[in-house]
Image (cartoon, rainbow, N blue to C red):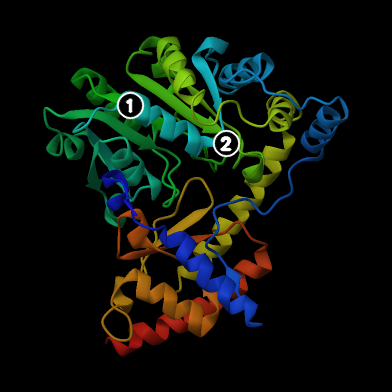
């Protein structure tokens, strides 16, 4: 059986491998607490579910236009105007099966073989593989906890060549929760555009920024330079709609047409029912977002208080999303030597699932999600702390 060359470099997801081990333990009757899953623990708001039910009752169950129904493309464009004061016309929007789908299509539509893509690290784990699947070359730019996991134009410049075509900028960031300030973001955008480097801004967590931090969006740059800026967003995180699979991309109308043509030969349109639910999400009551944001902020502070008592760990305070990225390298050298071994050890010993930092480009760290109930989070972190303290003590 022949396997294509493009798939030979693609690595299995470490997130899924940890989850598989957790499922094995649960099948054996072991109670496992997972802090590995990147999705809100809240139910999808009722008015969104009601819109989906109404669509089914109306038999809105046929194919739709590939880039999305007109109402949803308009609603997605209106989202940017409501949130940031920048109107985005419907022809500059395409709807995909989640943000991941939109990102994959964007890379397929814009990269040629050998094009280099700057990816600040730690990064969302699918970025490098998606770039490689499009024939591009991922070029990571690493920023550690001492820099709050944020890169600078100088760091990007040092990794730039005449083959650099794209920068993927993720703020708020998965896995670190880092949020670029307005001045930091502006300097990066000015550098990239002056260099003629396209910027794809992944803003899937834009509504989950914790005061006093504020969201800085690339859509204001897109308004003035659509040839070099695109903005990715979706409903999974802000509206607790992970399983509905609705994402959207704002880009130049000509690029949207090309992506739509390609999508027409792969997935075609996304689920018609999910599209109606998405319209209700974007145009309906927004108080559900504030409630979730407040809960995540409270949980972040709870987790930071617990982790603050771990002398062998380093964790910059995140300003957004719902993750902590904890440097635990001081626990290496005895029973475990890297983040994958550590996460496996924690799962087997403490029955707590975390994600190895190696999946995100930093093997010194582990990622945990605080999108779980407060008492579950506190219990899991206290158990984790006891076990990691044992490891750190062995290495003194």
Find residue 119 and report its image quarter: top left
Taking the spot 60% from the left edge, 56% from the top edge, the residue there is 371
118 is higher (above) or lower (below) than 186: below
Q: Residues within 10 Å of mark 1 (few under 14, many from 20)?
A: many
Along the viewing direction, whichever of 390 and 99 lies nearer the viewer: 99
In which quadrant will I find the C terminus? Answer: bottom left
- Side of 158 where 201 appears, left or right: right
Element under label 1? strand
Along the viewing direction, whichever of 82 and 267 lies nearer the viewer: 267
Along the viewing direction, whichever of 99 and 384 lies nearer the viewer: 99
Q: Is residue 152 visible?
A: yes
Q: Position of residue 386 (x, y in %)?
A: 48, 83
Taking the spot 22% from the left edge, 31% from the top edge, the residue there is 113
309 is higher (above) or lower (below) than 154: below
Taking the spot 46% from the left edge, 60% from the top edge, the residue there is 15
152 is higher (above) or lower (below) than 223: below
Farthest residue to the front: give it: 1
In which quadrant will I find the N terminus? Answer: bottom left
Disc 1 from disc 2: Cα separation:
20 Å
Q: Is residue 311 visible?
A: no
Q: Position of residue 285 (x, y in %)?
A: 76, 29
Q: Position of residue 75 (x, y in %)?
A: 65, 19
- Side of 349 where 128 appears, left or right: left
Instruction: Name the mark on residue 207.
Output: 2
Q: Residues within 10 Å of mark 2 (few under 14, many from 20)?
A: many
* Tag 1 residue: 199
Along the viewing direction, whichever of 300 and 74 lies nearer the viewer: 74
């Amino acid at each position: 059986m022949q396997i294509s060359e493009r798939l030979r470099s693609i690595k299995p997801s470490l997130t899924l491998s940890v989850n598989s081990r957790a499922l094995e333990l649960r099948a054996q009757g072991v109670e496992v607490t997972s802090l590995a899953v990147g999705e809100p623990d809240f139910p999808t708001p009722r008015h969104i579910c009601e819109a989906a039910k109404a669509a089914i009752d109306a038999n809105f169950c046929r194919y739709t236009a590939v880039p999305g129904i007109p109402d949803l493309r308009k609603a997605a464009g209106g989202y940017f105007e409501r949130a940031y004061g920048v109107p985005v016309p419907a022809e500059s929007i395409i709807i995909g099966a989640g943000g991941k789908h939109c990102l994959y299509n964007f890379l397929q539509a814009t990269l040629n073989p050998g094009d280099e893509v700057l990816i600040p690290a730690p990064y969302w784990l699918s970025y490098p593989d998606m770039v490689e699947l499009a024939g591009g070359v991922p070029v990571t730019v690493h920023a550690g906890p001492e820099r709050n996991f944020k890169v600078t134009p100088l760091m990007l410049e040092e990794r730039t060549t005449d083959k650099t075509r794209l920068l993927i900028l993720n703020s708020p960031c998965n896995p670190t929760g880092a949020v670029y300030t307005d001045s930091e973001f502006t300097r990066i955008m000015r550098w990239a555009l002056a260099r003629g480097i396209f910027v794809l801004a992944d803003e899937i967590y834009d509504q989950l920024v914790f005061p006093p931090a504020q969201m800085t969006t690339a859509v204001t740059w897109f308004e003035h330079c659509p040839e070099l800026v695109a903005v990715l967003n979706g409903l999974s995180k802000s509206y607790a709609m992970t399983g509905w699979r609705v994402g959207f991309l704002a880009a130049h109308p000509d690029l949207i047409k090309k992506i739509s043509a390609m999508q027409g030969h792969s997935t075609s349109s996304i689920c018609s029912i999910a599209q109606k639910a998405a319209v209700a999400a974007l145009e309906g009551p927004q108080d559900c977002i504030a409630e979730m944001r407040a809960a995540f902020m409270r949980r972040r502070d709870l987790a930071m208080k617990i982790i603050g008592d771990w002398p062998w760990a380093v964790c910059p305070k995140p300003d957004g999303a719902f993750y902590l990225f904890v440097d635990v390298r001081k626990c290496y050298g005895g029973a475990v030597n890297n983040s994958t071994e550590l996460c496996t050890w924690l799962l087997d010993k403490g029955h707590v699932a975390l994600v190895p930092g190696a999946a995100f480009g930093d093997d010194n760290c582990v990622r945990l999600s605080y999108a779980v109930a407060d008492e579950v989070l506190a219990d899991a972190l206290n158990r984790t702390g006891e076990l990691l303290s044992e490891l750190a003590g062995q290495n003194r």
